Image (cartoon, rainbow, N blue to C red):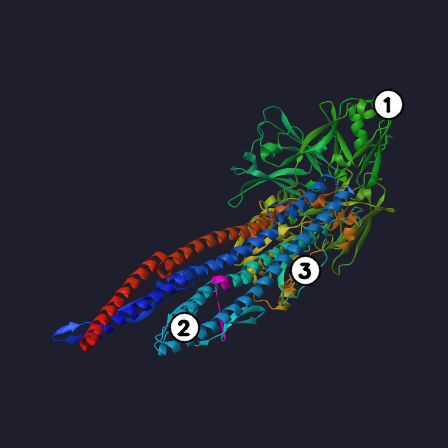
Amino acid sequence: MSLFNTLNTGISGIFSNKVAMNAVSQNIANVNNSNYSRRQVNISTNATINYGGFELGTGSKIESIERVRDQFLDVQYRKYNSDYGYWKTMNSNLNYIQSLYGEPSEDGFRRAFDEFWGSVHKILSEPTVPENKRELIYKAQELSNKMSSLFSDIESVKNNLNNDVENILKDINSKLSELSNLNRQIKELKTQNIEANDLLDKRDAILDELSEKLNFTVKEKKDGQISIILKNHEILNGEIYKKLSIKEVNGKNYVFVDNGIMNIKNGSLGATIELRDKVINEQLNRLNELAATFYDTLNLIHEEGYDLTGTIRGMNFFNELQSGNLETDKLRRIAGNILLSGEPKNYVDSYIKFNQNTINDIKVNFDIGSGELINIENGFEDNSDYVATINSGETLDNLSVGSKFRGDFNYKYSVQNGGLLTFANKGGSSLDNRLIIDFNRNIFKQMGIPTKDIEALKWTDIPSTSMQGIMTFKGPGNYTETLNLQGVTTLNEIAQRINVDADGDGNNDGGLKLVRAFVRNNELYIVPTDKAYGDMKNIIIDDPNGMLHEMNSNSVDLSVLDTSQNSLKNSFGLYAYKTKMFDLSGYLPTDNVAIKINYKDSTPQYTSTIQKSSLNGVTIGSNSEFQIVQNGEEFEILPGADGNTFSWENIDSIEINVGSSSIKIENFYYDEDSAANKLVNQGWATNTQSAKLTLKSDEDLKWRMNFLDFGSFISIQGKKINIDFHRDTLESLTKKINETNTGVLAFYTPGGRFVLKADKTINYDLKNAEIKGSEKLFELLGLWKHEDSTQPYSENFTLLNPDYDSNTLENKLKYASKFILSDTIDVAKNLKVKDYLLNNPDMLAMDLGKRIDSDNDGDIDTIIPSGEYSSTLWEEGYLLKSTKLFSDGKHDFEDYISDMITEVGLSGEKAKRMEINSDSLRTEYLNQRESVKGVSLDEEMANMIKYQQAFNAAAKVINVVDSMLDRIINGLMR
C-alpha cells in the first residue's frame, strides 16, 4: 500500500468529519426552531483493498444526512392536536354563548322570567292598582325584548361561525396547495438523490398546523411524496389535491369534496360546523319553542278574561304572528271550542275508598251528638226542609233529608273504582250554586268528602229599640239591597227578615239575595249566596245606626262542601236526568200561567195557558212528553211523561209567563240513583233497576250513563289511556296524556279549554301524531262535532293520523282552535306585547267571570263579569307557570329555562375540561417528539468535540504522510 493511499484515507476522514461538524453547526443554529428536525450524519467505511493478502481500509464516506423523526409520535401528536382544536373552538364559543344568558346575575335571562311571574303574583294581591297592571305588561315586554336580543346575539354567533367555516376552508385549501408544491419539489430532489430534509421539515410543519383543523391519515410513497386521506376521500395525492368547498343543500351549508358531502366531526373545522349546525341551532330552536309556547299560552289565557270594565273580552296579549299553512307548516297546538269549567257541579266524590259492599254498611261514628248539613240556596228558610241530619252510630242510608235539601250520598262498588262514595245532587240547583254547610264538622270530613272553610258573620244579641233601623248590603256589580231591622225582638225574627221579608212589612218578598241566615245554639249565622259568589268579602255592609256592634257581630269560619274537585263527570255534565223548576210563590192560585215550548226540529211550537191551581200533574208539550209536578210553591217539569223521551235533547227553549212577568226557570239535576227513584215515584217504572234501563233507552242520556259505568279511552301513538269519569279530573287526564311520552302534551286553560300541544318527539307537529278515542269524548272536549245524526257515534274514532291529506285534516279540525307556525318564523325575535295594552294597562284582562252552563252540556254558555276586584284570570294563569308544557311533559317554564342554561353551562364545562385534557395529551406527545427530533446543545457540543478531534487526527495523518513524502522526494534528491 502506497503513502498516497494513506493520504487519501486521511483526506476522507477530514471530509467526513468536516461534513459532520457542518451538520452539528446546523443543528445548533436551529436549536430554537420548533419545526426543525435535528440532522444525523451517517458515516460509513469506504471499500477496502486487498494488499498482499491483507484487507486494508481506504477511509470513510458520508452515507447520508438524515432527519431524526419518529413517525408514530407524529401520528399521535396530530391526533391529539386535532382533539385540541375541536375542544378549544367548542370552549371559546360555548363560553361566549353562556355569557349571553348573563347567568348568574341580576340582569340574566332567567331573572327576566322570574320578574314577569313575580308581577303576575303581585297583581293577585292588589288587582285594582293600575301600577300593578302596568308592571305586568312592561315586564312581559321586557321579557320579549330580552328574548329577541338573546336570539339575535346567538344568531350573530352562528353567522360568525359560518364565516369561520369559510375561512378555515380557505386556509385548508391553501395548505393543500403548499403541500402539493412541496411534494413536487421533494420528488424532484429524490430523483437526483439529493436529501430534501428542509422541505420535509416544512411539510411536517404544515401537516401539524393542518391537524388542528382536521383529523386525517397520511400515507408516504416511495418517491417521497405523501397522500392525505380524509373520511375515505383522498384530498391530496402527490402534486394533485382537491379543494374543500361549501355548497347549500335544502337551505343548509355542507362541506363538499368533489360531489360528496364531508361529515367532518374533528378538529376546529368539525367543532365550528357542529356549533353552527347543531349547538347553535339547538339553542335557537329552544328559544323559539320557549317563545312560541309563551306566546300561545298567554294569548289563550288572556283572550278568556274580561278587562277592568267587564265589557271587553277576547283580546290577545301579544301581536299576532303570521298564521301558517296547515298543509306545509307545523300544527303546533289545537284547543277545544268548549269551556270545560266543570260547572254546574253535581257530584263531589270521596277521597277515601271504602271496602263495604253497600251504603247500608257505612256508618258514621261521632264522638258526641249528631251531624247536621244545611243547604243554603235562593229561597232558603231556616227550617227542616233545607237540613239533613244523622246520629252517631247510624249508617249513611239513615241520613234524614228534608224535602228541599236536594242532596244525598250514594255508593257504588266496582273493580275499577273500588268503593266510591259520592255526595250527589238530588235535584235542585247545582252544588256549586249552593252552600252545603257541615255545621258540626263531623259528616263530610269523616266520609272523606272535600270541604273548605268560608267566612260567615255571627250575631249573638238583639240591637236595642233605639238603635234599630236600616242596614244596606252591597255586592258585586254594584248590586244593593236593604234590610229593615225595626221591631225585631229575637234572632229568629232577624233570620226571618233576611230570608223572607227584608223590608219587615209582613209580606214575603224573598228576603235578601246576597246573604241567607239561620239560628243555631242561640247564635245567628249570616252566610253568602251565589249572588255574592259565595264569599263574604264581596259584600259591604253599611250600618249607619251601629247595629252590628250592638249585635256583637264577629267573623267566624264555617265548613262547607268544596265543589272545586272537578271530576270529569262534572266537566262533561254526566247527569242521569234533568228537570226544570219554576217558583210561583208570588202568584194567586187563579193566576194564568202561559207555557211556550220551542223545538229544534220541525215539531210545531207548543203553547198552553193553565191556571196555577191546575198545574200539578198536567202533561204538556206537543207530544205530551212532559209532566208538571208541584212541591209547595215550586213546580217541576219532568221529561218522560210519554214513556219515550227522558231528556231535553229536542227542546230549543221553554218560556213561562204570568201576565207580563217572565218566570225564571232553573235546571234541576239528578244522579243515577235519585233519577231512578224519581221515575219510580212517578209511576213511570216499576223499580229502580227498570228505571235505570228506561233512562238508558234515551239516546241523550245513554252515553252519559255508559261513560259513568264503563269509562272511555284516548289512544296516542298507539298508547291507550283509560279514563275513569268518577276519579279522573281534567288535571289527571292531562297528566295521564303527558306521562305517555309520545310528544303530545295536554293542558287546559283557566277558562277550561282543553289543549293538545306538539312537542319535540313528534317534531313539534301534531300532524305526525295518531290520536284515537271515543268520538263523543272528542266532542265533549270541543275538538270535534258529530254532524250526521243518522249515524251512531264511533267508539274508535281517529281524530288525527299522519296519513291524513290536508283536506281531511282541515275537516277533522274545523271546530278546534289551531296554532299553525312556519319554521321560517322566529317567534323569539317577533314577540311583542299588544300596543293597546302598552298604551292602556287598564285593558289588561283580569276576570274570568262567573261561568254558567245553563243546560249542563259541559260547555259554558253564559259568562257574567265579576267586577273590578276580580283577578281570577291570573289566579288560574299563574298556575301555568308550573304546568309541564315542555320536554314531553317533564319541564315547566322554569325547568325548561334552567335546562337551557344548564345545558350550555355543562357543555361549556365539558369543553373546558376536554380542552385542558387534550392540550395535556398533545403536549405530552409534543415533548416526546421533541426529545427525539429536537436539538440538545450538550449532545451537539459533545459531537462537535468528537468530530473536531477526529478532524484534527485525520489532519495529523495527512501531515505525517506529507512529511514522509517530503523526506522521500526531497531527501533522495539531495
The residue where tag 3 is placed is 815
Q: Mark 3 or mark 2, which has the lower sequence index?
A: 2
Q: What stretch is highlighted in magenta?
A: 259-270
Separation of residues labelled 3 and 1 (CA atoms): 62 Å
Q: Does the magenta stretch include residue 267?
A: yes
The residue where tag 2 is placed is 227
Q: Mark 3 or mark 1, which has the lower sequence index?
A: 1
Separation of residues labelled 3 and 2 (CA atoms): 66 Å
Nearer the viewer's eye, disc 2 or disc 1? Answer: 2
Q: Which amino acid does label 1 sit on?
A: Met
Q: Find out whether the residues at labels 2 and 1 contact each other: C-beta distance under 8 Å.
A: no
Nearer the viewer's eye, disc 3 or disc 2? Answer: 2
- Is residue 690 in view? no
Callout 2: few (<14), some (14-19), or many (20+) C-alpha neighbours within 10 Å?
many
The residue where tag 1 is placed is 467
Q: What residue type is labelled 3?
A: Tyr
Say which residue appears at 58% left-offset and 54% top-offset.
97
Disc 1 secondary structure class: loop
Q: Quadrant of the N terminus?
A: bottom left
- Is residue 354 in view? yes
Callout 3: few (<14), some (14-19), or many (20+) C-alpha neighbours within 10 Å?
some
